[in-house]
Structure formats: C-alpha cells, structure tokens
Image: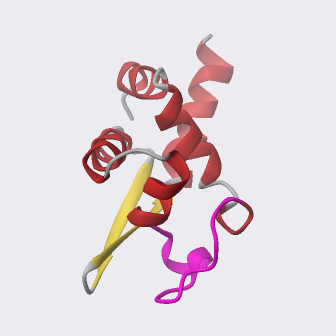
Amino acid sequence: MEPIRIFKTLSNENRLRILQWLTEPTRHFPPQQEEDIEEVGVCVDSIRRKLEVSQSTTSQYLSKLEDAGLITSQRIGQWTYYQRDEETIKEFARFVRDKL
C-alpha cells in the first residue's frame, strides 16, 4: 500500500465517488443482466452512465483507482467489472488512524 498514491488518487472527486458507490453497488447501480453485481462487481458502462462522462474518462478514473490498489477488475467475456479491494482500503484506514 502506497499512502501518497492513494491520497492523490482520492483527491479527484469522481474517483472518490466511484469508490464510495462501489461500497454499496446494489444501492447505486441498476441490476446487471450479465452478472451478479455483488458477486463480480459493477460493469464499466454502468459506472460511465452514472458519472455521465465518456468511456475513456471513466476508464482513466478506474485505471488510477486500480493502480492505487483501491479496486480490482475482472474481465468476463467482453465486459470488465470492478469491485473495491477491501484489504487495501482497511490497510489505508489503519494508516490514517494510526499515523495521522
């Protein structure tokens, strides 16, 4: 876990919103036809529609979150699904609690 990288990643409002939405995906996203939202994560297109930005912008946000270790991706067929990486998030929360 790289705290500086995570702080920089979360300094963008849309990236922070994505991470917050992924905490409760069934509350923030419509049901997916292809896969169970709780089991495999949220499809990139659902995130794009909620953000109301382009596919490339959404992909950039998700890439930064994944590079920081805050989310994981899983490709199933032609779709990519995203979930929070709870272990990294817990480790970061401990860092903030203990070191700041």
Indicate the quadrant where residue 32 lies: bottom right
Residue 40, percent across and down?
49, 77
Indicate the quadrant where residue 99 lies: top right
| Position above or below: 20 against 99 | below
| Position above or below: 64 against 49 | above
Q: Is residue 31 shown in magenta? A: yes
Q: Is residue 75 shown in magenta? A: no
Report if residue 7 is visible in the image: yes
**Residue shown at 49% from the left, 45% from the top:** 88
Residue 78 is left or right of residue 91, and the answer is left
Indicate the quadrant where residue 31 lies: bottom right
Q: Nearer the viewer, residue 16 or 6?
A: 16
| Position above or below: 40 against 3 | below
Q: Nearer the viewer, residue 85 or 79?
A: 79
**Residue shown at 66% from the left, 54% from the top:** 23
Residue 44, percent across and down?
39, 63
Residue 97 is left or right of residue 49, and the answer is right
Residue at the top extreme of this rendering: 100
Residue 84 is left or right of residue 23, and the answer is left
**Quadrant holding the C terminus:** top right
Residue at the right extreme of this rendering: 27
Report if residue 84 is visible in the image: no
**Residue shown at 30% from the left, 53% from the top:** 55
Q: Give the range drawn in magenta.
A: 28-43
